[in-house]
Image (spheres, rainbow, N blue to C red):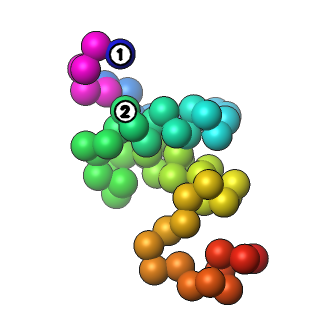
Amino acid sequence: MYNLPPTDHMPLPVMTVEEAHRVMQDHIDCLITLCPRKRQAKARLVEEARLIPAGATSVEVRS
C-alpha cells in the first residue's frame, strides 16, 4: 500500500486464494525458507493449482 516492507511474517489462521496472491506480492523480497506467511501462501496457491512449483512434472500437476 505504502511501499513499506511487511513486518508481520507469522502465518494466518485461514488464507483465501486472494490473500495468498497478495501475500506473495507483499512478501516478494522474503525468502520462502524464512517467511512462514509466504510459505503458507505458496502452499495455498499450489493446493488450488494456481501456482505450479518449479521442477513439478506433468504427472504431479495433473494430480
54 to 9, vertically: above or below: below
The residue depicted at 57 percent of the width and 85 percent of the height is 57
Give x and y (percent) for residue 14.
67, 34
| Residue 1 - label | 1
The residue depicted at 44 percent of the width and 73 percent of the height is 54
- Residue 19, quarter of picture: top right
* Image side of residue 35 versus residue 56, left or right: left
Give the magenta range: 2-6
Identify residue type, mark 1: Met
Out of 19 and 13, give the one closest to the viewer: 19
| Residue 26 - label | 2
* Image side of residue 55 versus residue 61, left or right: left
Out of 42 and 11, give the one closest to the viewer: 42
Give x and y (percent) for residue 32.
36, 54
Instruction: Tell me if mark 1 has few (under 14), some (14-19) or many (20+) residues whose alpha carbon lies within 10 angstroms of its own.
Output: few
* Image side of residue 59 versus residue 7, left or right: right
For marks 2 and 1 on the same chain, the one whose residue lies earlier in the sequence: 1
